[in-house]
Image (spheres, grey):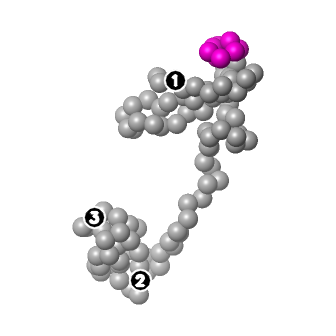
Amino acid sequence: MQFCDDCGSMMVNEDGQMVCTDCGATEEQAAGLSETYESTTEQSTDDVIETEEGLNFEGKPTDDQVHCDECGHEEAYYTFKQTASADEPPTRFFKCVDCGHRWRDYN
């Protein structure tokens, strides 16, 4: 894989010359790289876990006691999502098993 020196975006091989997918800059193919590249235009979503309301995946059940502010139930499903920079802890999203109320916990 080769990246553009001007903007840092990924470059693709077009007729033996590397072309930036963002700014259009061109350069010669870097020495030692394969003549063939496999480019994909779509991202696979096979391993993506969605936390949007109405989706079939509810997350994992909690091991520890949590408290739903809506109904008082103490069991919920949870998922993690990185909502801030990488050096910050992830956010834990909950969904009450009983009433479906959703909330989040910032660690």
Residues under numbered marks 2 and 3 in contact, where contact means CB atoms less than 8 Å apart: no
Q: Tell me: residue 91, above or below residue 20.
A: above
98 relative position to 78: left or right:
right
Label 2 crowding class (10 Å Cα cut-off): few <14, some 14-19, many 20+? few
Residue that appears at 41% across and 79% down: 13
Q: Nearer the viewer, mark 2 or mark 3?
A: 3
Whether residue 80 appears in this view of the structure is: yes
Residue that appears at 62% across and 49% down: 47
Residue 65 picture location, percent across and down? 64, 13
Q: Quadrant of residue 66?
A: top right
6 relative position to 62: left or right:
left
The image's mark for residue 33 is none
**Three-letter code for the amino acid on which mark 3 is drawn:** Cys
Give the residues drawn in magenta, as a range.
64-73
The image's mark for residue 105 is 1
Label 1 crowding class (10 Å Cα cut-off): few <14, some 14-19, many 20+? few
**Three-letter code for the amino acid on which mark 2 is drawn:** Glu
Q: Is residue 42 magenta?
A: no
**Three-letter code for the amino acid on which mark 1 is drawn:** Asp
